[in-house]
Amino acid sequence: MRIAIYPGSFDPLTNGHLDVVQRAAKLFDRVVVAVAKNEGKHPLFTAAERMRMVTEAVAGLPNVEADAFDGLLVEYVAAKKARAVVRGLRAVSDFEFEFQLALMNRKLDENIETIFMMPKDTYTFLSSRIVKEIARLGGDVSQFVPPNVQRALKKKLKV
């Protein structure tokens, strides 16, 4: 079975993330959307809230599941018996950082490959940070996030 891990903080999950998940689901037998518990980033949503949002958003994709992890990604990937890490690239500016991560992961475990995927061009400008800022200012984020995420943002930000 070809298993891929799509890791991220997903704070919150956007339609760009979902687009990458859907594309990866066509290439792999199973895709695990792995929510990183990295509290050092000071996320808006708790790990449990992010897990719930991702789980709801991918419920219609039969070969996709949500999970959470803490620690080294390569150890998590090995524990899941996966062979690939999927990473989204929105722009050239993402590439250098993602390339460094991919090389480091390869150094830590040469059996794990990194697959870079681009979302639809309509999502290349989209980031969780921008979505949170629009939501904080009372803007409409319905075209940028799944409905369950939009509801969670409204509730969390009380807007």
Image (tube, rainbow, N blue to C red):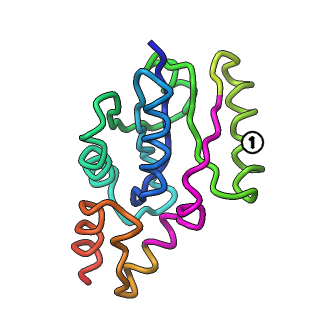
Q: Which residue, given by chain and number where applicable, does mark 1 sit on? A: 99
Q: Is residue 137 above or below residue 14?
A: below
Residue 59 in picture, x, y percent from top left: 24, 41
Tell which of 73 and 126 is nearer to you: 126
Based on the picture, tell me whether residue 115 belongs to the magenta stretch.
yes
Q: Residue sitting at 38 percent across and 66 percent down? A: 44
Q: Mark 1 is on which residue type?
A: Phe
Image quadrant where one finds the N terminus? top left
Q: Is residue 131 above or below residue 84?
A: below
Residue 3 in picture, x, y percent from top left: 46, 21
Q: Helix or strand or loop: what does disc 1 sit on?
A: helix
Q: Residue sitting at 50 percent across and 45 percent down? A: 20
Tell which of 47 and 4 is nearer to you: 4
Residue 131 in picture, x, y percent from top left: 45, 71
Based on the picture, tell me whether residue 18 belongs to the magenta stretch.
no
Tell which of 54 and 24 is nearer to you: 24
Quadrant position of residue 156: bottom left
Q: Residue sitting at 32 percent across and 60 percent down? A: 146
Residue 158 in picture, x, y percent from top left: 24, 81
Q: Which residues are magenta?
A: 114-131
Quadrant position of residue 147: bottom left
34 left or right of 121 in image? left
